[in-house]
Image: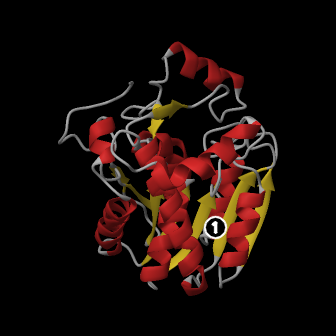
Amino acid sequence: MSGAVPAGIDYGFKLSGSTGKGVLLIHGLTGAPAEMKYLARRLHRRGFSVHAPQLAGHCQDYAALLRTTWHDWLASVEAAHAALRADVDEVYAAGICVGGALGLALAAKQRALKAAAVYSMTFRYDGWNMRRWYDAAARLLEPFANLPGVRRFSVGEPYPYGLKDERLRGAVEQSQGGLIEGALDRLPFGALYQMHRLARHVERVGAGVTQPVLLLHSREDDMSHPRNAERLRTALAGPVDLRLVEDSYHMLHVDKQRNLVADWTARFFGAGEPA
Protein backbone atom coordinates (compact mmCIF):
# COMPACT_ATOMS: atom_id res chain seq x y z
CA MET A 1 0.00 0.00 0.00
CA SER A 2 1.25 3.50 -0.77
CA GLY A 3 0.27 6.91 0.44
CA ALA A 4 -1.77 5.77 3.47
CA VAL A 5 -1.91 8.26 6.31
CA PRO A 6 -3.11 8.08 9.90
CA ALA A 7 -6.77 8.71 10.67
CA GLY A 8 -7.57 12.31 11.49
CA ILE A 9 -5.45 13.90 8.75
CA ASP A 10 -7.57 15.75 6.19
CA TYR A 11 -5.98 16.44 2.83
CA GLY A 12 -8.92 18.45 1.55
CA PHE A 13 -8.10 21.99 0.48
CA LYS A 14 -9.77 25.29 -0.41
CA LEU A 15 -8.94 28.30 -2.57
CA SER A 16 -10.84 31.57 -2.28
CA GLY A 17 -11.88 33.18 -5.57
CA SER A 18 -13.17 36.55 -6.71
CA THR A 19 -16.30 35.95 -8.83
CA GLY A 20 -18.83 34.58 -6.36
CA LYS A 21 -18.68 31.21 -8.14
CA GLY A 22 -17.39 28.09 -6.42
CA VAL A 23 -16.50 24.62 -7.64
CA LEU A 24 -16.47 21.36 -5.71
CA LEU A 25 -13.66 19.20 -7.08
CA ILE A 26 -14.27 15.56 -6.22
CA HIS A 27 -11.47 13.01 -6.41
CA GLY A 28 -11.86 9.42 -7.54
CA LEU A 29 -12.15 6.10 -5.74
CA THR A 30 -8.95 5.27 -3.78
CA GLY A 31 -7.71 8.71 -4.89
CA ALA A 32 -7.09 11.87 -2.88
CA PRO A 33 -7.73 15.62 -3.09
CA ALA A 34 -4.16 16.19 -4.30
CA GLU A 35 -5.06 14.77 -7.72
CA MET A 36 -7.36 17.78 -8.21
CA LYS A 37 -4.73 20.44 -7.47
CA TYR A 38 -3.77 21.22 -11.05
CA LEU A 39 -7.40 21.65 -12.09
CA ALA A 40 -8.03 23.70 -8.95
CA ARG A 41 -5.24 26.14 -9.80
CA ARG A 42 -6.52 26.59 -13.36
CA LEU A 43 -10.06 27.26 -12.17
CA HIS A 44 -8.85 29.60 -9.43
CA ARG A 45 -7.02 31.69 -12.04
CA ARG A 46 -10.40 32.14 -13.73
CA GLY A 47 -11.86 33.56 -10.50
CA PHE A 48 -13.50 30.47 -9.01
CA SER A 49 -13.40 29.55 -5.36
CA VAL A 50 -12.50 25.87 -5.02
CA HIS A 51 -13.19 23.24 -2.39
CA ALA A 52 -11.68 19.78 -2.87
CA PRO A 53 -12.98 17.60 -0.03
CA GLN A 54 -11.53 14.32 1.12
CA LEU A 55 -14.07 11.53 0.73
CA ALA A 56 -14.96 9.44 3.78
CA GLY A 57 -12.67 6.46 4.29
CA HIS A 58 -10.02 7.77 1.91
CA CYS A 59 -6.41 8.78 2.53
CA GLN A 60 -6.02 6.23 5.32
CA ASP A 61 -5.80 2.50 4.61
CA TYR A 62 -7.85 -0.28 3.05
CA ALA A 63 -9.62 -1.10 6.30
CA ALA A 64 -10.82 2.51 6.63
CA LEU A 65 -12.06 2.55 3.05
CA LEU A 66 -13.93 -0.73 3.51
CA ARG A 67 -15.75 0.65 6.54
CA THR A 68 -17.50 3.15 4.28
CA THR A 69 -20.17 2.98 1.58
CA TRP A 70 -21.02 5.29 -1.29
CA HIS A 71 -23.57 6.94 1.00
CA ASP A 72 -20.68 8.01 3.26
CA TRP A 73 -18.76 9.36 0.26
CA LEU A 74 -21.81 11.34 -0.79
CA ALA A 75 -22.19 12.70 2.75
CA SER A 76 -18.65 14.10 2.46
CA VAL A 77 -19.62 15.88 -0.75
CA GLU A 78 -22.86 17.20 0.75
CA ALA A 79 -20.97 18.65 3.71
CA ALA A 80 -18.47 20.33 1.38
CA HIS A 81 -21.33 21.69 -0.73
CA ALA A 82 -22.98 23.24 2.33
CA ALA A 83 -19.70 24.85 3.40
CA LEU A 84 -18.92 26.23 -0.05
CA ARG A 85 -22.46 27.47 -0.59
CA ALA A 86 -22.12 29.60 2.54
CA ASP A 87 -19.17 31.42 0.96
CA VAL A 88 -20.24 31.91 -2.68
CA ASP A 89 -23.31 32.79 -4.73
CA GLU A 90 -23.18 29.81 -7.13
CA VAL A 91 -21.83 26.29 -6.69
CA TYR A 92 -20.74 23.85 -9.40
CA ALA A 93 -19.28 20.35 -9.15
CA ALA A 94 -16.63 18.51 -11.16
CA GLY A 95 -15.24 15.06 -10.51
CA ILE A 96 -13.29 12.18 -11.97
CA CYS A 97 -14.97 8.77 -12.33
CA VAL A 98 -16.59 8.05 -8.93
CA GLY A 99 -16.12 11.73 -8.08
CA GLY A 100 -18.18 12.69 -11.13
CA ALA A 101 -20.90 10.22 -10.17
CA LEU A 102 -21.01 11.72 -6.69
CA GLY A 103 -21.40 15.18 -8.22
CA LEU A 104 -24.45 13.96 -10.13
CA ALA A 105 -25.88 12.28 -7.04
CA LEU A 106 -25.52 15.66 -5.34
CA ALA A 107 -27.19 17.41 -8.27
CA ALA A 108 -30.21 15.11 -7.99
CA LYS A 109 -30.65 16.13 -4.34
CA GLN A 110 -29.53 19.76 -4.42
CA ARG A 111 -31.31 21.89 -7.01
CA ALA A 112 -29.12 24.79 -5.94
CA LEU A 113 -26.15 23.14 -7.66
CA LYS A 114 -25.87 25.09 -10.91
CA ALA A 115 -24.12 22.55 -13.17
CA ALA A 116 -21.79 19.56 -13.08
CA ALA A 117 -18.82 18.21 -15.02
CA VAL A 118 -18.09 14.48 -15.12
CA TYR A 119 -14.73 13.14 -16.27
CA SER A 120 -14.30 9.48 -17.31
CA MET A 121 -17.61 8.12 -16.06
CA THR A 122 -17.31 4.43 -15.30
CA PHE A 123 -20.14 1.94 -15.13
CA ARG A 124 -17.78 -0.87 -16.14
CA TYR A 125 -14.03 -1.18 -16.48
CA ASP A 126 -14.13 -1.99 -20.18
CA GLY A 127 -11.41 0.21 -21.69
CA TRP A 128 -8.82 -1.01 -24.17
CA ASN A 129 -6.31 -1.92 -21.45
CA MET A 130 -8.74 -4.07 -19.49
CA ARG A 131 -8.34 -7.74 -20.27
CA ARG A 132 -11.28 -9.18 -22.16
CA TRP A 133 -12.24 -11.48 -19.33
CA TYR A 134 -12.10 -8.69 -16.72
CA ASP A 135 -15.50 -7.12 -17.30
CA ALA A 136 -17.24 -10.49 -17.58
CA ALA A 137 -15.54 -11.69 -14.39
CA ALA A 138 -16.46 -8.46 -12.61
CA ARG A 139 -20.11 -8.93 -13.53
CA LEU A 140 -20.08 -12.49 -12.15
CA LEU A 141 -18.21 -11.46 -9.02
CA GLU A 142 -20.27 -8.37 -8.22
CA PRO A 143 -23.06 -10.11 -6.22
CA PHE A 144 -20.38 -11.63 -3.97
CA ALA A 145 -17.87 -8.76 -3.87
CA ASN A 146 -19.08 -7.38 -0.55
CA LEU A 147 -19.12 -10.71 1.30
CA PRO A 148 -16.69 -11.24 4.21
CA GLY A 149 -13.56 -12.93 2.96
CA VAL A 150 -14.06 -11.54 -0.54
CA ARG A 151 -14.38 -7.81 -0.05
CA ARG A 152 -10.79 -7.43 1.15
CA PHE A 153 -9.29 -8.90 -2.02
CA SER A 154 -7.93 -6.14 -4.23
CA VAL A 155 -6.63 -5.45 -7.72
CA GLY A 156 -3.84 -3.11 -8.69
CA GLU A 157 -4.11 -0.41 -11.31
CA PRO A 158 -2.38 -1.74 -14.43
CA TYR A 159 0.23 0.08 -16.50
CA PRO A 160 -0.11 2.75 -17.98
CA TYR A 161 -2.06 3.89 -14.86
CA GLY A 162 -4.61 5.91 -16.83
CA LEU A 163 -1.89 8.23 -18.14
CA LYS A 164 -0.73 8.80 -21.69
CA ASP A 165 1.74 11.45 -20.54
CA GLU A 166 5.03 9.52 -20.38
CA ARG A 167 6.59 11.91 -17.88
CA LEU A 168 3.75 11.47 -15.40
CA ARG A 169 3.67 7.72 -16.03
CA GLY A 170 7.38 7.52 -15.27
CA ALA A 171 6.88 9.50 -12.07
CA VAL A 172 4.22 7.01 -10.95
CA GLU A 173 6.59 4.11 -11.57
CA GLN A 174 9.45 5.78 -9.71
CA SER A 175 7.20 6.55 -6.74
CA GLN A 176 5.90 2.94 -6.73
CA GLY A 177 2.32 4.15 -6.96
CA GLY A 178 2.63 6.86 -4.31
CA LEU A 179 2.71 9.93 -6.55
CA ILE A 180 -0.59 11.31 -5.20
CA GLU A 181 -0.34 12.00 -1.50
CA GLY A 182 -2.93 9.96 0.40
CA ALA A 183 -3.97 7.75 -2.53
CA LEU A 184 -4.09 3.95 -2.39
CA ASP A 185 -2.53 1.84 -5.12
CA ARG A 186 -5.02 -1.04 -5.09
CA LEU A 187 -8.81 -1.29 -5.32
CA PRO A 188 -10.53 -3.62 -2.81
CA PHE A 189 -13.48 -5.61 -4.14
CA GLY A 190 -15.71 -4.18 -1.42
CA ALA A 191 -15.02 -0.64 -2.68
CA LEU A 192 -15.60 -1.77 -6.27
CA TYR A 193 -18.98 -3.12 -5.15
CA GLN A 194 -19.84 0.32 -3.71
CA MET A 195 -18.75 1.99 -6.95
CA HIS A 196 -21.15 -0.15 -8.96
CA ARG A 197 -23.97 0.59 -6.52
CA LEU A 198 -23.30 4.32 -6.84
CA ALA A 199 -23.29 4.12 -10.64
CA ARG A 200 -26.65 2.33 -10.63
CA HIS A 201 -28.02 4.94 -8.25
CA VAL A 202 -26.95 7.75 -10.56
CA GLU A 203 -28.61 6.00 -13.47
CA ARG A 204 -31.84 5.67 -11.47
CA VAL A 205 -31.92 9.31 -10.33
CA GLY A 206 -30.68 10.72 -13.65
CA ALA A 207 -34.22 11.77 -14.56
CA GLY A 208 -34.02 14.18 -11.64
CA VAL A 209 -30.78 15.79 -12.81
CA THR A 210 -32.05 18.76 -14.78
CA GLN A 211 -28.95 20.93 -14.43
CA PRO A 212 -26.55 21.25 -17.38
CA VAL A 213 -23.89 18.53 -17.38
CA LEU A 214 -20.54 18.47 -19.16
CA LEU A 215 -19.35 14.93 -19.92
CA LEU A 216 -15.69 14.60 -20.86
CA HIS A 217 -14.31 11.21 -21.82
CA SER A 218 -11.10 10.21 -23.51
CA ARG A 219 -11.52 8.57 -26.87
CA GLU A 220 -8.55 6.37 -25.87
CA ASP A 221 -9.61 5.74 -22.26
CA ASP A 222 -7.63 2.71 -21.12
CA MET A 223 -10.04 1.85 -18.30
CA SER A 224 -13.56 2.79 -19.35
CA HIS A 225 -14.80 2.84 -22.93
CA PRO A 226 -16.58 6.01 -24.18
CA ARG A 227 -19.80 3.97 -24.22
CA ASN A 228 -19.89 4.66 -20.46
CA ALA A 229 -20.36 8.37 -21.17
CA GLU A 230 -23.00 7.61 -23.79
CA ARG A 231 -24.86 5.45 -21.29
CA LEU A 232 -24.78 8.26 -18.73
CA ARG A 233 -26.00 10.82 -21.26
CA THR A 234 -29.16 8.78 -21.92
CA ALA A 235 -29.93 8.70 -18.18
CA LEU A 236 -29.80 12.47 -17.59
CA ALA A 237 -32.83 14.73 -18.01
CA GLY A 238 -31.08 18.06 -18.40
CA PRO A 239 -28.92 19.42 -21.23
CA VAL A 240 -25.75 17.38 -21.73
CA ASP A 241 -22.60 18.45 -23.56
CA LEU A 242 -20.62 15.27 -24.33
CA ARG A 243 -17.10 15.80 -25.66
CA LEU A 244 -14.49 13.18 -26.49
CA VAL A 245 -10.97 14.21 -25.56
CA GLU A 246 -8.06 13.22 -27.77
CA ASP A 247 -4.53 12.31 -26.73
CA SER A 248 -5.28 11.32 -23.13
CA TYR A 249 -6.22 8.22 -21.17
CA HIS A 250 -8.50 7.75 -18.14
CA MET A 251 -7.00 10.41 -15.84
CA LEU A 252 -7.74 13.14 -18.35
CA HIS A 253 -7.84 15.93 -15.75
CA VAL A 254 -4.09 15.47 -15.14
CA ASP A 255 -3.05 13.91 -18.46
CA LYS A 256 -1.77 15.50 -21.68
CA GLN A 257 -4.95 17.52 -22.35
CA ARG A 258 -5.37 18.77 -18.76
CA ASN A 259 -5.31 22.42 -19.86
CA LEU A 260 -8.11 21.81 -22.35
CA VAL A 261 -10.15 19.94 -19.73
CA ALA A 262 -9.74 22.82 -17.28
CA ASP A 263 -10.61 25.46 -19.89
CA TRP A 264 -13.70 23.61 -21.11
CA THR A 265 -14.83 23.19 -17.52
CA ALA A 266 -14.30 26.86 -16.69
CA ARG A 267 -16.27 28.02 -19.72
CA PHE A 268 -19.07 25.55 -19.03
CA PHE A 269 -19.34 26.98 -15.53
CA GLY A 270 -19.62 30.50 -16.91
CA ALA A 271 -16.11 31.87 -16.55
CA GLY A 272 -14.95 34.73 -18.69
CA GLU A 273 -11.85 34.48 -20.83
CA PRO A 274 -8.57 34.28 -18.87
CA ALA A 275 -6.71 37.52 -18.35
Which quadrant of the structure image shows residue 33?
Answer: top left
How far across and down, in percent of the image, does residue 266 sit? Answer: 61, 62
How far across and down, in percent of the image, does residue 157 sit? Answer: 57, 31
Q: Amino acid at mark 1?
A: Gly
Question: Viewed as shown, does residue 206 lie left or right of 230?
Answer: left
Vertical side of 3 occupied by 40: above or below = below
Using the rendered image of the protein, determine whether residue 45 is visible from the camera's viewpoint.
no
Question: Viewed as shown, does residue 261 lie left or right of 73?
Answer: right
Q: Looking at the image, which residue is at 49% across and 48% down?
A: 192
Judging depth in this view, the residue of 81 and 107 nearest the camera is 107
Vertical side of 273 occupied by 241: above or below = below
Q: Looking at the image, which residue is at 62% across and 25% down?
A: 168
Q: Residues within 10 Å of mark 1 (few under 14, many from 20)?
A: few
Q: Which residue is mark 1?
A: 272
Q: Looking at the image, which residue is at 38% across and 53% down?
A: 15
Vertical side of 227 occupied by 164: above or below = above
For label 1, the SS is loop
Judging depth in this view, the residue of 30 and 134 nearest the camera is 134
Using the rendered image of the protein, determine whether residue 166 is visible from the camera's viewpoint.
yes
Picture quarter with the N terminus: top left
Question: Viewed as shown, does residue 172 lie left or right of 165?
Answer: left
